[in-house]
Amino acid sequence: MRLTNGQKKALHAVARQAGLNNVAYRLVLRNLAGVDSAASPRWRREDFIMIMGLFEKGAGGQLKGNAPGYWRDELRLARPGDALRVRIRREAAAMGWTEGDLDRFVASNRMSSGQFASIDDAPAEWLVKVLEAVKAMKTREQGAGNREKPRHAHAD
C-alpha cells in the first residue's frame, strides 16, 4: 500500500517530535517496516501503525494531535492475535510446556489436524479456541494435582 499524504505528514511529524535526524529516521523505516521512505509503495498498514505506536511509546504514551494511547489501541486492532498468543504462551508455560510442546498441540488432531503448524500460523479467531483448550487443561491439571506435562502435548 502507499501511505496517504496525511500518513506521510504524521510519520514525518512524529520523527521530528522524537528528535530523529534523517539518517536515524530512515534506519527506523528500514529496520521496522522494510521501506526506505514514507513514499515507498511497499508499506503495510500494520507496519505504519507499529512505527507510530513505537514513537508514541517513546513520547510517553501520547503523540501531538492524538489521544493518549491512540496508536497502541490501533496496533491491537491491526494485529488482534498477538495478545492472544501472549496469553496462550503464558498459560502453557504455567503448565511447564515448551514452545515445541505448544506447537505440537496446535498441530495435533485435537486442535487443527495439521492445518496450523504452530501458534504463529493460526488466525486470531482460531486462537480463542486454543486459549480455551489450554486453560481447560490447566484447570484439570491443577484439580488433579498433576504438575507433569499432559501426554497429548507431545504426541497425537
Image: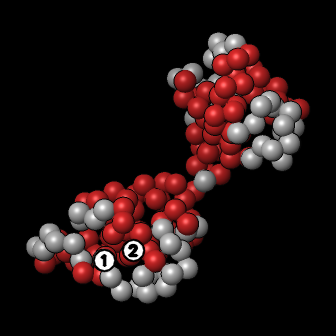
148 or 9: nearer the eye? 148
Identified by mark 2, the residue type is Arg
Residue furthest right in the image: 5
Q: Which residue is mark 2?
A: 104
Instruction: For residue 52, say whether it is visible.
Output: no
The Cα–Cα distance between marks 2 and 1, rounded to whole angstroms, is 6 Å
Q: Are marks 2 and 1 in contact (CB under 8 Å)?
A: yes
Residue at 54% from the left image edge and 59% from the top image edge:
81
- The mark nearer the N terminus, 2 or 1, is 2
**Image height check: is 128 above or below 62?**
below
Q: Residue at x 49, y 85 (%)?
A: 113
- Amino acid identity at mark 1: His
Residue 84 in the image: state x and y as whole percent. Answer: 47, 59
Question: Of the numbered discs in the image, which one, if any, rests on residue 15?
Answer: none
**Residue that numbered label 1 is attached to:** 154
The foreground one among 68 and 81 is 81
Residue 22 in view here = yes
Q: Residue at x 25, y 60 (%)?
A: 94
Q: Residues within 10 Å of mark 2 (few under 14, many from 20)?
A: many
Residue drawn where x is 61% and y is 45% of the image: 75
